[in-house]
Image: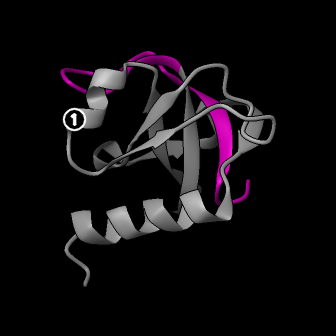
């Protein structure tokens, strides 16, 4: 599983405001058997929140609709939650997400 890849993941047991259901997510890292992902939503109103990035569908990313990467909901998942790879984001988008993660975690 490569950073920047978009996989369909199973978040059916999420709680509260967490993203839930089967949804695409962008791989951003991982360690110790867990994979860090940024979940996506097709609810464009979510773009109003800080630490989000809008991603338009294209042949490379495999998305069907315009989506919002919810960087503020970064989560570590077990490999069992991953269904299949649907595509990948561009290098420019990957770097933008990394910058948003750095800002979210106040690493600068």
Range shown magenta: 1-22
Residue 61 horizontal/vertical position (percent): 72, 39
Residue 75 horizontal/vertical position (percent): 39, 46
Answer above or below: position of 58 versus 16.
below
Residue 83 horizontal/vertical position (percent): 71, 27
Residue that extends furthest to the right in the rendered view of this protein: 59
Q: Which residue is mark 1?
A: 48
| 89, 104: nearer the viewer | 89
Residue 2 is left or right of residue 51, and the answer is: right
Note whether residue 75 is visible: yes
Residue 105 horizontal/vertical position (percent): 23, 68
Answer above or below: position of 81 versus 102.
above
Q: Secondary structure at mark 1?
A: helix
Indicate the quadrant where residue 107 lies. Answer: bottom left
| Number of on-image labels | 1
Note whether residue 31 is visible: no
Q: Is residue 12 magenta?
A: yes
Q: Quadrant of the C terminus?
A: bottom left
Residue 89 is left or right of residue 87, and the answer is: left
Q: Is residue 80 magenta?
A: no
Q: Quick one: label 1, few (<14), some, or many (20+) residues within 10 Å? A: few
The residue lying at 76 percent from left, 36 percent from top is 85
The residue lying at 21 percent from left, 48 percent from top is 50
């Amino acid at each position: 599983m490569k950073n920047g890849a978009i996989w369909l993941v199973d978040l059916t047991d999420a709680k509260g405001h967490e993203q839930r259901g089967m949804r695409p997510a962008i791989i951003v890292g991982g360690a110790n058997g867990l994979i860090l992902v940024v979940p996506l939503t097709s609810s464009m109103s979510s773009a109003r929140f800080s630490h989000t990035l809008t991603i338009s569908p294209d042949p490379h990313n495999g998305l069907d609709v315009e989506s919002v990467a919810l960087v503020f909901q970064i989560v570590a998942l077990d490999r069992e939650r991953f269904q299949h790879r649907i595509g990948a984001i561009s290098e420019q988008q990957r770097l933008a997400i990394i910058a948003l993660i750095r800002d979210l975690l106040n690493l600068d």
